[in-house]
Image (tube, rainbow, N blue to C red):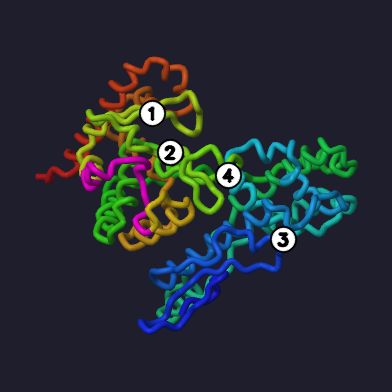
């Protein structure tokens, strides 16, 4: 039985129990939501994960409809947050939709925990306490607590959960942004707090050092294929082999602002930025403008990567139309959160450590190239890093360089597999 899943409803049927997510809210705007119910399938954990994703999208949609009324400053931090999110001229609306989602996570934390605090009563000591509280380790889930207790019975004491440095740092960075916008709005207390924050520093999370290995990427791909999730296998292969960002492979969904603009639209969101089959020509050359910087073009010869070609060849030629990565159960591109949840389940099953994420595929590919002896400048071209922008004008050279990186990486794999005598 699935528990603690927002919006989950179950119905008895002749063939068993059916699970549904239901859009339910006290807001009168809820009846306008384009999806009222959605049938769910999968394991209990998968159903719960789908509910969380659907509920999050529903709440974000309601927020966009202004269910709380027009934002006005009332002296609380919450009101400044709402002004930052709802004011048309706010820089909040100038960032990409995936960045806004990241912002909303931290803004939600601030609003939930300290949103009722009045600005005139805040000092720098409050901010220090907030940061310390935000970085506290997360409490064990029921499953984690049971596992911890079981291991303790065997005399094995598991380490405590790690501090949430990234969570705390992001929240304080968003606090700076919100207070700074309050200065723009000429809110008197924001001037004082902006000065205080300018004198404070909060420890930033350490740079990630994790990277996916080829063996891990290959294991994830093979399990995904076995489970009928070829789309995840292809996405993983593209990310690792071509060192592409996740968003440049699976794309992203953003709120529809112009219903007449066309494209793939679902539940009030339009898909964009992902790979299309039209990006891959008949010679196997993949060319795509990246989403990070509009004038940087990724150009790769997929024929140089045999394993990637295996994954590409799993898609019949007649189906190579539109987006490359299509969710098997819906027939449309993946939502980012659901993709990451399914990927994590696969990674767990093949033994990839929890601290290694799908986004580490890019780092894994670059690391493999470096270990294989690839020239640093060539690797920059291969990964389309910002400091390679000036060399991107030499597009003919770019393809040659990325092919050389590919050859070195594949050859390096062969050397590692040679038996030692």
Circle nearer the N terminus (3, 2): 3
Q: Is residue 125 visible?
A: no
- In space, the residues marked 2 and 4 are separated at their CA atoms by 20 Å
Q: Which residues are magenta?
A: 313-329
- Give how far across and how far down residue 364 sits, in percent: 36, 42
- In space, the residues marked 1 and 3 are separated at their CA atoms by 41 Å
- In space, the residues marked 3 and 4 are separated at their CA atoms by 27 Å
- Give how far across and how far down residue 257 sits, in percent: 61, 41
**Mark 4, residue position:** 256
Circle nearer the N terminus (2, 1): 2
Displayed quadrant of residue 109:
bottom right
From the image, which quarter does the C terminus lie in? top left
Q: Residues within 10 Å of mark 1 (few under 14, many from 20)?
A: many
Q: Residues within 10 Å of mark 3 (few under 14, many from 20)?
A: few
Of badges 3 and 2, nearer the viewer stands 2
Q: Secondary structure at mark 2?
A: helix
**Mark 1, residue position:** 298
Q: Is residue 401 above or below residue 225?
A: above
Tell me whether the residue at label 2 lies in contact with that at label 1, contact meaning CB atoms closer than 8 angstroms: yes
């Amino acid at each position: 039985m699935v528990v603690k899943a927002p919006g989950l409803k179950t119905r008895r049927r002749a063939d068993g129990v059916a699970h549904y997510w239901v859009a339910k809210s006290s807001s009168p705007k809820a009846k306008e939501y384009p999806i009222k119910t959605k049938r769910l399938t999968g394991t209990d954990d998968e159903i719960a994960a789908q509910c969380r994703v659907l509920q999050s999208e529903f709440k974000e949609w309601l927020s966009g409809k202004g269910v709380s009324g027009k934002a006005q400053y009332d002296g609380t931090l919450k009101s400044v947050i709402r002004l930052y999110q709802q004011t048309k001229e706010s820089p909040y609306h100038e960032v990409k939709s995936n960045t806004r989602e990241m912002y909303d996570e931290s803004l939600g934390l601030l609003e939930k925990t300290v949103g009722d605090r009045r600005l005139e009563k805040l000092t720098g000591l409050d901010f220090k306490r907030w940061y310390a509280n935000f970085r506290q380790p997360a409490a064990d889930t029921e499953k984690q607590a049971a596992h911890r207790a079981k291991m303790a019975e065997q005399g094995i004491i598991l380490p405590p959960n790690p501090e949430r440095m990234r969570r705390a740092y992001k929240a304080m960075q968003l606090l700076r942004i919100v207070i700074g916008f309050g200065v723009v709005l000429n809110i008197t207390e924001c001037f004082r707090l902006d000065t205080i924050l300018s004198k404070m520093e909060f420890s930033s999370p350490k740079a990630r050092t994790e990277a996916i290995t080829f063996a891990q990427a290959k294991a994830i791909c093979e399990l995904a294929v076995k489970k009928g999730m070829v789309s995840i296998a292809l996405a993983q292969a593209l990310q690792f082999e071509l060192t592409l960002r996740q968003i440049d492979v699976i794309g992203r969904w953003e709120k529809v602002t112009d219903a007449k603009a066309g494209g793939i639209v679902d539940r009030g969101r339009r898909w964009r930025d992902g790979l299309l089959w039209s990006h891959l020509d008949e010679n196997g050359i993949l060319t795509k403008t990246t989403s990070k910087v509009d004038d940087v073009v990724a150009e790769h010869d997929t024929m140089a990567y045999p394993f990637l070609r295996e994954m590409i060849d799993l898609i019949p030629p007649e189906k190579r139309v539109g987006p490359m990565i299509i969710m098997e159960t819906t027939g449309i591109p993946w939502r980012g959160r659901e993709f990451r949840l399914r990927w994590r389940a696969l990674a767990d099953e093949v033994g990839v450590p929890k601290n290694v994420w799908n986004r580490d595929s890019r780092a894994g590919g670059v690391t493999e190239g470096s270990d294989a002896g690839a020239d640093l400048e060539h690797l920059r071209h291969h990964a389309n890093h910002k400091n390679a922008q000036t060399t991107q004008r030499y597009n003919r050279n770019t393809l040659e360089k990325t092919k050389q990186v590919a050859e070195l990486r594949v050859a390096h794999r062969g050397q590692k597999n040679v038996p030692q005598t």
